Image (spheres, helix red, strand yellow):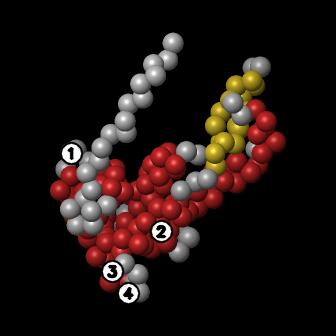
Amino acid sequence: MPSKFKSPARFVQPDPRYQHVLVTKFVNCIMEDGKKRVAYQIFYDAMDEIAKRIKDKEPLEVFEAAVVNVKPLIQVRSRRVGGATYQVPMEVKKKRATALAIRWILEASRKKKGRPMFKRLADEFIMAYRKEGTAMATRDNVHKMAEANKAFAHLTW
């Protein structure tokens, strides 16, 4: 029997420079081996790079717009029905959409080699802001897959 108590979402402190929770979540995903200071430095250097390249917008606005643009609206989930496995398109919850967007942006910027991480990250933010780039391609592929499997939408649970 399920409990009636639901645990609250873990509280995340806003970051020091922008006082924004999404920035902290992004930095936590950048972080490797517990080196949060290094992760913050990478993120803030990327924001400074964005400020140099895009003069008419604030870097935080570019970052937020990039994450919103990369968020998927729909995804496919495997569903087993009578011995066959179907890819069923389903809506993505807000929290998961944000997590996927962050993951895809970081994955895209980590794949590119030969330049400092903050420059690769700034490039990916700017491209996602303009609705192009690797992270947007990943999102478009997920949407295409969901569109192709629309026939199995009736199997949603």
Left or right of 56 on screen, residue 36: left
Nearer the observer: mark 3 or 1; the answer is 3
Q: Which mark is residue 51?
A: 3
Relative depth, front residue between 137 and 96: 96
SS of the residue at dot 2? helix
What amino acid is at disc 4? Lys
Q: Disc 2 marks which residue?
A: 65
Q: Secondary structure at mark 1?
A: loop
Determine whether label 3 and label 1 are within 8 Å by CB.
Answer: no
**Mark 4 to mark 1: distance in Å?**
33 Å
- Tell me how many marks there are: 4
- Which label's residue is closer to the chain start, 3 or 1? 1
Reply above or below: 35 against 79.
below
Res 55 label: 4
Image coords of residue 87 (percent x, y): 70, 37
Residues at discs 3 and 2 in contact (Cβ within 8 Å): no
Q: 137 or 77, which lies in front?
A: 77
Q: Which residue is mark 1?
A: 34
Judge by depth and name the residue closer to the eye, 104 or 51. Answer: 51
Vertical comparison of 8 with 65: above or below: above
Cα distance in 3D space between marks 3 and 1: 28 Å
Looking at numbered disc 2 in the image, what kind of residue is underneath it?
Answer: Ala
Q: Quadrant of residue 62?
A: bottom left
If you read the primary sequence from the N terminus, does the residue marked by circle 4 or circle 1 appear first? 1
Q: Residues within 10 Å of mark 4 (few under 14, many from 20)?
A: few
On the picture, is 113 further left or further right than 4? left
Q: Which amino acid is tagged 1?
A: Gly
CB contact under 8 Å: marks 3 and 4: no
Amino acid type for the residue under numbered disc 3: Ala
